[in-house]
């Protein structure tokens, strides 16, 4: 409540007039609703409904709310939600599950902070996220994929952008995920837009730090339409491994996206090369490689000159058992390189 006092004095009639004007100033403040209990975004009491804490006294989000999903909270879009003047923020440790459709108006965003999760719940509408009439995320084939951890940033009406704004990057990546499938891992990703995109590179790692290239996929060049891509790793690591996607322009500029992890419980491929040191014979054995695939063995000296080369082929079980005669090589240290399906392994041996 603000009071303004105006004093007028007339010297002729000595009348003092005091006027009191009272102005009520109402501050307009956007409503923020923070989820305080996991559950469905919109459900009746006692039906697993999420609970909210909102400024302004509201008990649940409305069309003018900024919706926040904090750490430790999971909110499920259980039925179609249309918000004309609202944005959604998934904080580090928070999770949003799409069992149905979230429809945001133009200029609004779904912000994913570092560590926030998006899960495709597998039910409801095929279009998961729509912004300004554009479908940004669609449902994935059954079985539904594991939780996807996105880079910090946001979804806008043009796709995913690490600034949460309309992107000027060569490629806007909507999602990148890995799914185990029998004896292989299927990698799939979707772009919102592409500008001068030459190709994608996929890499794999056991520890999330040291990566090796597993393949490339041709890009779409320049397009404003969403594009779907897929790559199959036929020789995945057993247990938890990491995959990284990068994109390269026609001018050679490369952008690297955030890695994802996947757990694979199938058989892991591998090989043995022994003995080391050796005198006459080097024994090469592979297992669980791709059936009838080519495996190249190249041995080079310390100057990088190739001194031994052999092309081998796996049997129907993906195995090789081969004795390599290297008795004519002079004594010394050599580099052995095995390669197959675009993968390379290097190690040293000593010839006595």
Image (cartoon, grey):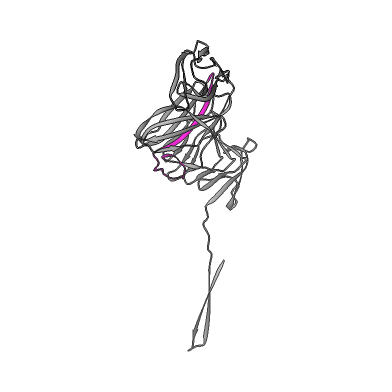
Q: What is the number of callouts on the image?
A: 0
Q: Nearer the viewer, residue 313 or 59?
A: 313
Q: Nearer the viewer, residue 281 or 284?
A: 281
Q: Position of residue 9 (x, y in %)?
A: 50, 84
Q: Nearer the viewer, residue 212 or 54?
A: 212
Q: Height in image: 195 above or below 2?
A: above
Give the position of the N terminus as an image quadrant: bottom right
Considering every residue shown, the one lying at the far right of the view is: 46
Indicate whether residue 237 is drawn in magenta: no
Give the position of the C terminus as an image quadrant: top right
Considering every residue shown, the one lying at the far bottom of the view is: 12
Q: Nearer the viewer, residue 187 or 240?
A: 240
Q: Which residues are magenta?
A: 157-183
Q: Position of residue 12 (x, y in %)?
A: 48, 89
- Determine the image quadrant of residue 246: top left
Indicate whether residue 164 is drawn in magenta: yes
Q: Position of residue 239 (x, y in %)?
A: 59, 25
- Determine the image quadrant of residue 252: top left
Q: Position of residue 143 (x, y in %)?
A: 54, 24
Q: Height in image: 49 above or below 342?
A: below
């Amino acid at each position: 409540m603000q009071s303004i006092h105006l004093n007028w004095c007339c010297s002729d009639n000595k009348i003092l007039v005091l006027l009191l004007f009272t102005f009520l100033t109402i501050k307009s403040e956007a409503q923020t609703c923070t989820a305080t209990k996991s559950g469905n975004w919109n459900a009746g009491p006692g039906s697993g409904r999420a609970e909210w804490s909102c400024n302004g006294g509201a008990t649940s989000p409305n069309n003018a709310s900024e919706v926040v999903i904090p750490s430790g909270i999971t909110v499920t879009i259980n039925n179609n939600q249309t918000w004309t003047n609202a944005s959604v923020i998934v904080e580090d440790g928070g999770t949003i599950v799409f069992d149905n459709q979230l429809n945001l108006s133009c200029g609004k965003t779904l912000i994913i902070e570092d560590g926030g999760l998006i899960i495709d719940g597998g039910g409801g509408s095929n279009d998961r996220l729509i912004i300004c009439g554009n479908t940004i995320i669609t449902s994935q084939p059954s079985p539904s994929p594991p939780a996807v951890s996105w880079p910090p940033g946001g979804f806008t009406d043009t796709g995913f952008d690490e600034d949460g704004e309309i992107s000027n990057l060569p490629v806007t990546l909507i999602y990148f995920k890995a799914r185990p499938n029998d004896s292989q891992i299927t990698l799939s990703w979707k772009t919102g837009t592409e500008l001068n995109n030459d190709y994608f590179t996929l890499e794999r790692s056991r520890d999330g730090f040291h990566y090796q290239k597993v393949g490339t996929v041709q890009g779409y060049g320049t397009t404003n339409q969403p594009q779907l891509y897929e790559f199959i790793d036929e020789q995945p690591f057993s247990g938890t491994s990491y995959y990284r996607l990068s994109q390269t322009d026609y001018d050679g500029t490369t952008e690297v996206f955030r890695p994802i992890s996947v757990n694979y419980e199938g058989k892991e491929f591998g090989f043995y090369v022994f003995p080391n040191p050796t005198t006459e014979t080097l024994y090469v054995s592979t297992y669980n490689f791709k059936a009838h695939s080519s495996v190249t063995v190249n041995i080079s000296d310390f100057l990088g000159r190739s001194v031994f080369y052999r092309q081998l082929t796996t049997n129907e079980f993906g195995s090789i058992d081969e004795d390599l005669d290297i008795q004519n090589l002079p004594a010394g240290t050599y580099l052995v390189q095995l390669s197959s399906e675009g993968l390379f392994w290097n190690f040293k041996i000593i010839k006595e």
